[in-house]
Amino acid sequence: MSATTSEPTSGTKMDSGEEIGALATIRLGMLYSPELREGLGWTLVLAVIASCGQIVVPIAVQQTLDKGLDGPGGPRFDYVAWMGVLAAFAIVVTSVASYAMTSRLFTTSEHGLATLRTKAFRHVHDLPLLTQNTERRGALVSRVTSDVDQVSQFLVFGGLIFIVSIGQMLVATVLMLVYSWELAAVVWLCFAPLFLSIRWFQKKLSAAYTVVRQQVGVLLGAISEPVVGAAVVRTYGVEDRTQRRIDTAIQDWQDAYTHAQTYTVTSFSLGGLSAGLANAGVIIVGILLGFTSDMTPGRVLAFAFLVTLFVGPVQMGTQILTDAQNAIASWRRVLGILETPADLVDPGADGETLPRGPIDVRFDHVGFAYPAGPPVLRDIDLTIEAGTRVAIVGETGSGKSTFAKLLTRLMDPTEGSVLLDGIDVRRIDARSLRRSVVLVPQEGFLFDDTIAANVRYGRLGASEDEIRASALELGIDDWLSGLPRGLHTPVGQRGESLSAGERQLVALLRAHLADPDLLVLDEATSAVDPALEMQIGRALERLMQSRTSVTIAHRLSTAESADEVIVVDKGRVVQRGPHAELVTQAGSVYSGLHASWTAQHSHA
Amino acid sequence: MGKDAELRGTTTLDGFRVLWVGVRREPKVFTVATLGAVLFGVLTVADAWVLGWSTQHVLIPAFDNGEIGTDMLVWVFALFMAVAILRAAGIVARRLGGGIMYYRMQSHTRRAVTRQYLALPMEWHQRHPTGQLLSNAYSDVEAAWSPIMPLPMALGTVVMMAIAVVQMFLADTVLAFVGLLVFPAVVAANLLYQHYSSPLMTRAQGLRAEVSEIAHESFDGAMVVKTLGRETEETDRFGAKARELRDVNIRAGRIRAVFDPALASLPGLGVLVVLAVGVARVTSGATEAGDVVTVAYLLTIVSFPIRAIGWLLGEFPRSVVGYRRAKAVLDARGSMEWGDAELPRTEQGALLQLEDLHYSYDADSPLLRGVDFDVRPGRTVALVGPTASGKSTLTSLMTRLVDPDSGTVRVDGRDVTELRKGQLSESVSLVPQTAFMFDDTVRDNVTLGADVTDDEVWAALRTAQADGFVAALPGGLDSLLGERGTSLSGGQRQRLSLARALVRRPRLLILDDATSAVDPEVEARILASLRDDVDGSAASLVVVAYRKATISLADEVVHLDEGRVVGRGTHAELLASSPAYAQLVNAYEVDGTPLASSTGVDAEGTTR
């Protein structure tokens, strides 16, 4: 990586999704998870049945008490019996409908979210490395894990119940209007402040939960320091300082959550106050109406009962609305990933396929600059013949690593084009490109598995014999058989059970198994001892005979054994030719590099 | 089945035990939240009483008399509002209290867990995967205390149920007994629900962790996945787990779909039974119609909150698992023992002595088998050996990141295990192979809180050849590096890591191949200025190195192979006396001739 890549300018930033509106979020969510729409109509019908049933029962009970039991003529058996049958029937229907609704909801939403999760995961891998790096790893992971879980909670328990609550509110309102429009108006008036404040609360909650999210990220980062940086913290004796940073993060996290909770609680208790106001209002206005109209005590009491039917769903609805802020925010973040453009578009099956055999590389007036950054490469125009071994050298920050990234299409050039076998890399099917072109980076990442499993990333289904044969060809079979469990040695998290040099050996073996036609090495043997490096170097040389290879060389010993050396300086190719030729060009960049190399390696 | 039930029984009991830990830790907040919940419960019942009072004393008389005093209307209003306000206060106390207690308990545990992470020895860290430790400190803690949120509500419900039961008995004993059947039925249904769902919940929790681990690893290895074109395979790996989680969630959901309506309809059924019995009793004159109304009404209002108990119990399996995992960290023993000896306060380089050090990660293949050598004050020693010969482990022993299986490390004649904690890190600095950066500014990454001036920071950066790129950063020393310094290149991170060591002016500086990602030219400049710097302060220096320029800087070379010191002396002496050594360090030369000779011209003949 060159110095210029380090500018925290970064290309496309990961879309936080924050600017997507609540309804737009739901619409977009449905688009990415089409399963959510499936059978939604029937589920809604079931929901309506279930919610109607829930109103029928209390009404039947109230009617029974009012007319069947307490009626003017004493208890009426038949009335009670009929109402009992009706209520029992309603309970059965409600239960069945509710069961069907809930299990349908679980099925569709879990299917939809599993799809969303997997799509988002895939999309992260399709994003350019640069974009991936704009977000903390932990935060990125939580977007495909806990954020999706939040949405699941909302979809199953929130969304539909909210619609049902509104339905119940409307039914209750209609019933209230039938009993007395004046009293219905009183009730709505009492709840008006709550309804009017909902938007305000939503905004506040949305902001509060954004802070919560950020603090969770900071907290996760702080927690990871004593774990990931355990050695540094100990060697520098900075335990106290690390703990202080964690304690601050913990406190800020706690404050953020408490702040958000304050709004939730306030909005919820406001619902209780409105209910009290409505109850008092109904009795008082009912009495006053009694003096001027045909209002009776029975009707006032019946109305008071209707108010409770109204209050339940209102409180449920406000609760869901406030809880939904968190869920919608989570949904936004997941969708934000999918809305982040994958700059490197894979033409897929429509793309061209590279023929097998050594690849011919051409840089056609290529320029590259990071967004809002200075040019890293300028007007690179060169051809690398198929089957040649080329070394690219240059000082730190000269742009040589960018070269490798453009060649392997980890990034696309901002000007000109990179052609492999005469085909623009942007038009090559990614599968074909990855099959034929392999990059071995400086810090080879290993997965927490055995060595065998890791090298199989290079060739799926490679047999152990094939792997051993490959190791033999590379000349690292001694090392491999010297390991206590050979190929089955677990490498630990990120390969940390192996030394840096051993990790590079595994990465190399992995690349060798991949059998590429164009191999790009970014100083892939920097951490192994010189004897082993030279041994591998010689093996690689043999292996590269039928392929094209480009090595980003930090050590000039690599350059010396290449067919050709390309010297990059300040984003331009300044010299090109075999080592022996370049080194004689006195005063050139290469001779400078060479002098400092020999000063180090020939014995002082 | 019997064992299963027993297990479930323990879970419920353990769940209460975990809660008890929380209650004892935050008794005040717990009390406030519970009182709030009780207040809420009492006032929910009182609501019915106010309605009854208003009906009897205001509504009926008003309609009967055709008039009513304003004062009575004010009373109605005042009573309803008083109940509403008090109930709102109850809600605030309950929910805010519950929330605050929940957050505080998480904070307490996280502070304790992270303190353990800092206190436990490196050897413990090596045995535990990073991902596990991160989830122990975050999601496990969250799960452990999750029942705190519904706890006050559940306790309030118990009080509410008690009041309702008393009132029902006051109204009519027989009806009360009938109504009372509802409560055990609800509890039984809840227990049954838990019996079926908690194994699924536990499984889902485990799968969630697995999904998260795959995502973490896959995103960490994004570069490998991309360059080898393994996106589809990775997505399949992730998708398979996501689908497994989905299926478990759906199964748990179906069970919930059965129990939810069952739980919801139980009070309704109870009311129906009460009515049926009630009508019979009213007809036979055994009870008043009003009493039937009271019992039915009480059942209705208690029916909903009763489910809070179910929510509480439902969190238990998750909570117990989370608590156990976090507790395992808290109970971990084996902190490094420190003595109380101090190192001399001088500017002099330190004396390092290694005596018969043995160390193995795996008992079958010991890594170090009796390493002896010393570094005298102010001297520079190069540690040379083939890949995986134990050089890095040796540097960990020198800085007491780990203790040897046997043997002694001495600094200034003191066994490092006798030193007071913090003494060693004041005098000895290690620059590791892989540089770790904090998510902080350049300045703070260099100082790590040490009391040094910006001039000193710049001086250290200059020595590490990092002043150039730091000056070019938009914020200079104040530039933020981002998580693990991902905005920097490997070489840049290594140079900052070096500056971090230099700024502390250590008396013993250990470089573990600390410039491997730096270009040779830049490295040469670092070594040159390091030499000046080290000479100036007379610090002792241990370098793990391959490059001859680095090696030749050393006063002495220690050649390590197969876990032993196989050669000591100057570079020239070893070259002459040890063929193995010569082969190792001369690899860049062919037949004794440097591949790239200093004249360059005669390289022509040998290379092509």
Image (cartoon, rainbow, N blue to C red):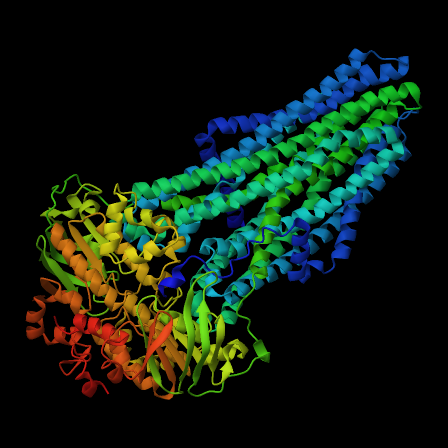
Residue A193 figure quarter: top right
Residue A314, can we see it? yes
Q: Nearer the viewer, residue A156 or A600?
A: A600
Q: Position of residue A286 (x, y in %)?
A: 85, 23
> In the rendered view, would you say A347 is above or below A96?
below
Residue A592 figure quarter: bottom left
Q: Position of residue A327 (x, y in %)?
A: 60, 48
> In the rendered view, would you say A478 is above or below B306?
below
Q: Nearer the viewer, residue B221 or B397?
A: B221
Q: Position of residue A94 (x, y in %)?
A: 77, 46
Q: Position of residue B521 (x, y in %)?
A: 24, 67
B132 left or right of B39 in image: left
Q: Where, quadrant-wise, is the C terminus of chain A in this rendering? A: bottom left
Residue shown at 24%/80% (left/top)? A583
B528 left or right of B327 in image: left
Q: Nearer the viewer, residue B163 or A330?
A: A330
Q: Where, quadrant-wise, is the N terminus of chain A in this rendering? A: bottom left
Residue B174, can we see it? no
Residue shown at 20%/73% (left/top)? A595
